[in-house]
Amino acid sequence: MNTVERAEAAEHALSQELDRLVIMKSTIYTSGERDPRVAVPRPPSEGKRFLMGHDPRLPRMPEKPTLFDFFKYRFGPANHMLQSARLAQKNGVDEKIVLACLLHDIGIAGFIRGDHGYWAAQLVEPYVDEEVSWAIRYHQALRFFPDESVGYRYPELYTKLFGADYTPEPYIHEAYRFARAHKWYMTSRLVTVNDLYAFEPGVEVELEEFTDVVGRHFKQPKEGLGLDASPSSHMWRTIMWPTRYL
Ligand SMILES: [Fe+2]
Ligand SMILES: [Fe+2]
C-alpha cells in the first residue's frame, strides 16, 4: 500500500469503528449551550453499543502511559508551560519550581479551564512533593495580585481579557491572603514570575529537555498514570478516555 492508500484505509477503519459506537457527551461539555437542568438527550443507538473505552477519534495512549505521553497525546500545544519551565531553569530556581512551572497549566492544556490551578494541583498531588502541588494550586490566586518585591505586576493580558474593572471572586482573595502568609508563598510566587514572561512566539522547547527533572521529582506509577490507584488516577483516566458512557 502506498501512503495515500494507507491513509484511506485508516480513515475507512475509523469510520467503521465510529459506526459501531454511540458517543454521548458529558453535561460539562454542553452546559451553557444547553440548560443543564434539562436531561441530556440520549442519542438513538439503533442497536449500536455506547462507547466504554478508547475513543477512536483520539490518538491511542500507550498501555502504561507516562506524564510525557499525556503531554504528547492529550494536551494541546504545551509551549507555554515548556517556555515557563525553561525560563525558571535559566533563572536558577530550585528544580522543584522548574517542575511546578512545567505542570502549572496542565488543567487548561488537558482538562478544564475554570479553576485550572486547583485542578492541576489535584492531578499531580499524589506524584510530586507537597510543595510543588501547593505552588501550582496557589498560582491560580497569586496571578491576580502584584508583588513588587520580585517585580511581579498584574498581567496586562488580564486587563485585555477580563476588562479593567474585573476583580476576582472572594474565594480567590481569601486564597491569596492564606498563601501570602504561608511558608511556601515564594515557591508559588516564582511560578507566577516565570509564567508572566513565558509567552514568546517562535521559541520551541522540547519536552525531553525536562526528562531528568521529571525523572527526579515526578513519581511515575509503574502501572501507568491513570491505571494506578491514587486519589487522582480517575482524573487521568478521564483525560485518557474523555467520552466513555460511564
Ligand atoms: Fe495558570
Ligand atoms: Fe501559565
Image (tube, rainbow, N blue to C red):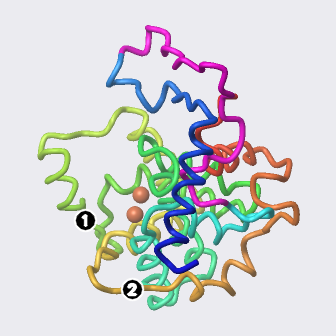
Crowd tier of the residue under label 1, counting other residues whose Cα lies within 10 Å: few below 14, some 14–19, many 20 or above:
some
> Where is residue 40 shown, x and y percent of the image?
49, 16
Name above or below for residue 198 compared with residue 87: above
Residue in view at x 78 percent, y 44 percent: 231
Q: Can you tell which mark lies on residue 153? A: 1
> Where is residue 119 shown, x and y percent of the image?
56, 46
* In-image side of 240 versus 135 (left or right): right
Q: Amino acid at mark 2?
A: Glu
| 85 is within the stretch colored magenta | no
Closer-to-camera residue (166/60):
60
Residue in view at x 33 percent, y 64 percent: 147
Closer-to-camera residue (20/132):
20
In which of the image's four quarters is ligand 2 placed?
bottom left
Determine whether label 2 and label 1 are within 8 Å by CB: no
Crowd tier of the residue under label 2, counting other residues whose Cα lies within 10 Å: few below 14, some 14–19, many 20 or above:
few
- Over which residues does the magenta segment extend? 35-60
The quarter of the rendered structure image containing the N terminus is bottom right
Closer-to-camera residue (27/1):
1
- How far apart marks 2 and 1 lie (CA) works out to 26 Å
Closer-to-camera residue (54/203):
54
Choose mark 2 or mark 1, whichever is in front.
2
Circle nearer the N terminus (2, 1): 1
The quarter of the picture where residue 53 lies is top right
Q: How many marks?
A: 2
Residue in view at x 24 percent, y 61 percent: 155
- In the structure shown, which secondary structural element does the residue marked by tag 2 occupy? loop
Name above or below for residue 178 compared with residue 6: above
Majority secondary structure in the magenta region = loop
Q: Can you tell which mark lies on residue 204? A: 2
